[in-house]
Image (tube, helix red, strand yellow):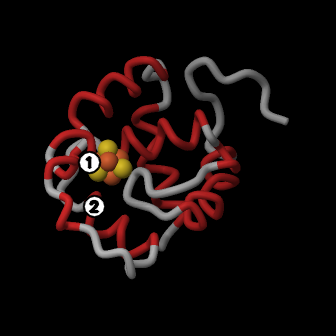
Amino acid sequence: MNLTSIAWELDRLRWAPTAVLDQVVARDGLCMWVLADEPSWADEDMTDRELAARMCAGCSVRDECLELELRTAGDDTVGVWGGLSADDRRELHPYWLRRGDRAERGPRS
Ligand code: SF4
């Protein structure tokens, strides 16, 4: 996983308001509608990384979902969002923070 590259790709969403990202993910997220009606797609023995790879493959708002989760949960993230496991997002978080300003984000600590 190239963390710098992933963080760089999210820069295109830098100035998208968080409320808009939230709406887009809720509207178009694959897991919000399609997969919710198919209980058999998930296997209880899957790791979160495997679940992310399966669940988020083909989701059209994967970047928006990842950007949203990094903004709203940051280092406290849990579960599978944006095609990544929580461990992978926590590893990505400092790289993402170093990319600079975001809509509605106050000064970085
Ligand atoms: S990227 Fe994954 S977690 Fe996010 S909306 Fe799409 S399917 Fe759901």
Residue to which mark 1 is pinned:
31
Q: Is residue 23 above or below residue 69?
A: above
Of mark 1 and mark 2, the one earlier in the sequence is: 1
SS at badge 2 = helix
Residue occupying the point 44% across, 77% down = 47
Is residue 98 visible in the rendered image? The answer is yes
Instruction: Name the one closer to the observer, 70 or 50.
Output: 50
Are the residues tagged 1 and 2 within 8 Å (C-beta)?
A: yes
SS at badge 1 = helix
Q: Amino acid at mark 1?
A: Cys
Q: Amino acid at mark 2?
A: Met
Q: Which mark is residue 55?
A: 2
Residue occupying the point 48% across, 22% down = 18
* Mark 2 within 8 Å of ligand 1, using the beta carbon: yes
103 sits to left or right of 67? right
Q: What x and y, as percent, mark residue 1? A: 47, 73
Instruction: Name the one closer to the observer, 15 or 82.
Output: 82
Q: What x and y, as percent, mark residue 87? A: 60, 66
Q: Is residue 37 above or below residue 80?
A: above
Residue occupying the point 70% across, 53% down = 94
Assign the C terminus to one quadrant of the image: top right
* Mark 1 within 8 Å of ligand 1, using the beta carbon: yes
Instruction: Name the one closer to the observer, 20 or 96.
Output: 20
Q: What x and y, as percent, mark residue 22? A: 40, 26
Furthest toward the right, the residue is 109
Q: CA distance from mark 1 to mark 2?
A: 7 Å
Which image quarter: residue 84?
A: bottom left
Furthest toward the bottom, the residue is 45
Q: What x and y, as percent, mark residue 21? A: 39, 27
